[in-house]
Amino acid sequence: MSISPLVRSPRLVALLSLASLAACGGNQSSAAGGGGGDVMALMQARDLTEQDVTAALKTYTPTGRHDEYYTFASGGHGGNLIVIGVPSMRILKYVGVFTPEPWQGYGYGDQSGDVVGSVTKGGHEITWADMHHPALSETGGDYDGRFIFVNDKCNPRIGVVDLHDFVTKQIVGTELIQSEHGAAFVTPNTDYVVETAQYPAPLGGGYAPIEKYDDEYRGAMVFWRFDNQKGRIVPEQSFAIELPPYMQDLADCGKKGSDGWVFCNSLNVERAYGGILEGKPPLESGASQNDMDYLHCINWRRCEELAKAGRTETIAGMRVIRLETLLQENVIAFVPEPKSPHGVDVTPDGTKVVVGGKLDTHCTVYDLPKIAASIGAKKFVGKDPYGVPILDFQDSIVGQCEIGLGPLHTVFDDKGFAYTSVFIETVVAKWSLKDLKVVDKIDTHYNIGHLVAAEGDTVNPDGRYLIAMNKWALDRFAPVGPLLPQNFQLIDISGEKMSLLYDMPLPLGEPHYAQMIKADKLHPIDVYKPIGFNPAIDQVDPAATVAGKERIERKADGVHVYMTAVRSHFSPDIVRVKQGDTIHLHVTNVEQAKDATHGLAVGGHNVNVSLEPGKHCNVTFQVDRAGVFPFYCTEFCSALHLEMAGYLLVEPQ
Ligand code: RUQ
Ligand code: CUA
């Protein structure tokens, strides 16, 4: 056997002897009798380099061992939230949020159906979402592991997922705006979830000719009030602010010294609106004429006071502070930002905000104390067409870092470095916040959008791991037709140089952003207690079925079936009804053993629920045709799982 010079490197030999030592310690008898000989043979056979093996050793997670971090990634078009373990990159769960999720029975029972269907648009049911940005709840600017919020860009909505059981509890939406992008972002103590409109439209819906864009179209920023005790957004205590008709983009809240402020970048201050067939330039070129767009700096705490003082007007059910009021009260100002900016990320110490420039080669670093002071002193150099005061660019920045072509988003580590995704150059650039100099770059495959680092957007980043969230994946994986997955690349950022550890295809929608939280901050339950708990309403369901009290009752509104599930039967297992009846199924899994989940499916009626231990579900459905409909358990729960079945007998009229 010839060993390539590569695998003879001292570092690898050290690694391999460590690996074989570990194997001996575990009483594993290695075929090669230890010494790492067969590892080298394996490397040759599989054509692996030292770098590959090092990466494998850093990510491989033996059976039974848990990951150090959870990553919560947006599920993009899938409308659900993806939970991934790091460093193994094992997918742990898809949490149904805006889209029904059959495995979890999410959207198939009465109450979970109420959650997923709670926001309609002009009477239209919406069964998908364009989810972009998850935001973990924070206390003092640090993730606290209690909740996570997600947005829907297409039909402005916010979903609230409770991390005590990883279930979506609430979806809220507003007709004030017709699209959004800068969501979900939380204030440092999760008092508000921020949602920023993207494509201007008349506030509150309704029609205005596009030629009236300047006068009748508007942007907005919504502040959804979150009740930390109840774990729900309170729409009545929420408010919005009116903004000029630019395309407000991402947002980030100030932290520490800059707490109380929110920052959002914008594009299309040109107010272009396309019209290709009407002899006008396409939107994209109309929107890219000016050298500068505007970073919006908003004092949300003062806005909150104005809302409390009733300085609002109600539009489409939302209390809105008009732009005029914001200007009178000096709570908003703009700072120029280079051409088509993207990303707006406040540094962990709260003193700076970093803005990328899609069509620029720099990240611009703004000085937040200076900006707040200038606004306080009304040190403005001009006004935009809507009267919003503008601060001097040079006066408001710390400097600019020459990054490369197409810098987008920035996250931070624990050592004073920033990491920026660079879309066109398709790299991650690591740079120093101290002297604004790039110190390292690593290629990504291909076209990185967002990136996420361990707790990298909090006051207290961990460093260690970073995931490049790449838009394109050509040639990375076995081909699967024209629609390719996206590619998450796990990168080790613990050393001076970044190193690539793992490629993970994401095959169900374009995940835009993600957040990575230390696993020991989460304390999810393992069974629902007390028995009969309905997670959609967060309490014991009034219709929960107690073991021994199973029954079928005919009432004015239909037939109520009080059912229990336990290994390995449903009781009752024969349900006799009449054609035309409405069935109200109240089914409780009365088990408390971990992972003893049952599912209940009824043929021909789209009935499918998941019954985790202790959980209760209500399902209402109509039986409009006579027949014999088997129902059965959909989780392989026991040796007699196939026998866990029954009959719904629908007698003809
Ligand atoms: S932003 S396109 Cu998160 Cu880069 Cu949505
Ligand atoms: Cu219960 Cu299978």
Image (tube, grey):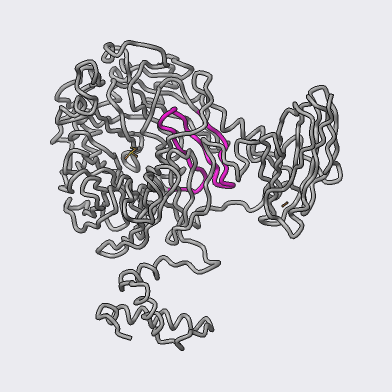
Q: Which quadrant of the view contains residue 115?
A: top right
Q: Residue at x 51, y 28 (%)?
A: 126
Residue 396 at x, y = what percent? 18, 36
Residue 170 at x, y = what percent? 55, 34
> Can you say whether 3 is above or below 522 in the image?
below
Nearer-the-camera pick, 485 or 480: 480
Left or right of 190? Residue 289 is left
Nearer-the-camera pick, 167 or 243: 167
Left or right of 161? Residue 495 is left
Nearer-the-camera pick, 511 or 628: 628
Q: Is residue 8 visible?
A: yes
Nearer-the-camera pick, 351 or 483: 483
Residue 282 at x, y = what percent? 22, 24
The part of the chain drawn in magenta is 143-172
> Can you say whether 435 is above or below 105 in the image?
below
| Quadrant (top left/top right/bottom left/bottom right) for the C terminus | top right
Secondary structure that dominates the magenta span: strand
* Membership of 146 in magenta stretch: yes
> Can you say whether 176 is above or below 350 in the image?
above
Q: Which quadrant of the view contains residue 38?
A: bottom left
Residue 257 at x, y = what percent? 31, 41
Q: Residue at x 28, y 31 (%)?
A: 297
Q: Is residue 376 visible?
A: no
Q: Residue at x 67, y 41 (%)?
A: 609
Left or right of 608? Residue 256 is left
| Quadrant (top left/top right/bottom left/bottom right) for the N terminus | bottom left
* Membership of 454 in magenta stretch: no
Q: Which quadrant of the view contains residue 252?
A: top left
